[in-house]
């Protein structure tokens, strides 16, 4: 099996996590972020020995000028403080590879442009962010980004159609309750808002 040439980091609070994890394009590896730790630190650690990636994707909730993780938000100021970690993310990319941020409206308006500039400077790489909602078309979402590159969604075309949420307002946390080494695709091993994962 060929190694993954793209990585997607997924925050545990995003909706319809099962579709995200089971609907990835070939060559895309998923890493679910620990909600108790800063996202940038986890990304830097996971990519410390990786080089030549075509893209690093991030799927998390967002708002203009902000990407919201369970472990803390990215704003322009926060990104500047975490520049060393984001620099490690950028070094994992091949020349021309990009950091693709799938977070609703994170790149919208003046605040979005400030965030994009901060991430671009910290990672020393091309960046693409969402100007609108990301996710289900029925909820007003799309799988398109704007920025330095034309970004391809980490999901297959079929999964983009079946994805049932948008990554805007933050819902309650989704936590893993299954045993180590078991499949992420088993909905009985996820706990959402203190109860079982809803049937999708």
Image: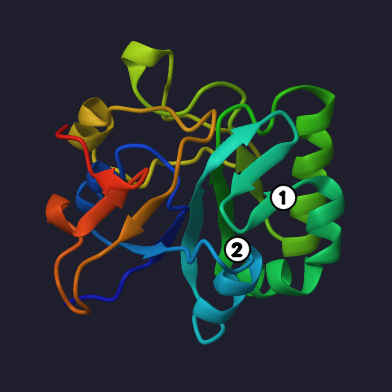
Residue at left offset 51%, top offset 23%? 133
Marker disc for residue 39:
2
**Residue with the mark numbered 1:** 74
- x, y (%) of residue 101? 57, 45
Q: Are marks 1 and 2 in contact (CB under 8 Å)?
A: yes
Residue drawn 56% across and 53% down? 70
In percent of width and height, residue 192 lies at: 32, 45
Q: Secondary structure at mark 1?
A: strand
- Count of marks placed on residues: 2
Residue drawn 49% across and 74% down? 52
- The colour scheme is rainbow
The answer to whether residue 96 is left or right of residue 55 is right
Q: Which of 37 and 125 lies nearest the eye of the viewer?
A: 37
Q: Quadrant of the N terminus?
A: bottom left
From this view, report whether residue 2 is shown above or below residue 171: below
How crowded is the residue under tag 2: few (<14 C-alpha within 10 Å), some, or many (20+)?
many
- Residue closer to the observer: 192 or 15: 192
- The answer to which quarter of the image holds residue 106 is top right
Q: Earlier in the sequence, mark 1 or mark 2?
A: 2
Question: Residue 46: percent from the left, percent from the top?
Answer: 50, 78
Q: CA distance from mark 1 to mark 2?
A: 9 Å
> In this rendering, is residue 43 above or below 157?
below
């Amino acid at each position: 099996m060929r190694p993954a040439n793209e990585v997607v980091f997924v925050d545990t609070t995003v909706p319809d996590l099962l579709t995200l994890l089971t609907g990835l394009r070939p060559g895309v590896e998923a890493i679910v972020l620990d909600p108790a730790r800063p996202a940038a630190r986890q990304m830097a650690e996971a990519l410390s020995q990786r080089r030549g990636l075509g893209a690093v994707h991030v799927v998390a909730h967002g708002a203009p000028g902000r990407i919201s993780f369970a472990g803390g938000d990215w704003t322009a100021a926060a990104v500047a403080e975490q520049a060393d970690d984001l620099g490690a993310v950028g070094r994992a990319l091949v020349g021309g590879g990009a950091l693709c941020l799938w977070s609703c409206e994170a790149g919208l308006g003046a605040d979005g442009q400030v965030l994009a500039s901060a991430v671009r400077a910290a990672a020393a790489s091309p960046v693409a962010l969402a100007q609108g909602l990301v996710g289900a078309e029925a909820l007003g979402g799309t799988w398109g980004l704007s920025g330095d590159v034309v970004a391809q969604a980490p999901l297959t075309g079929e999964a983009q159609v079946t994805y049932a949420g948008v990554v805007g307002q933050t819902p309650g946390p989704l936590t893993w309750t299954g045993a180590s080494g078991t499949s992420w695709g088993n909905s009985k091993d996820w706990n959402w808002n203190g109860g079982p994962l809803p049937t999708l």
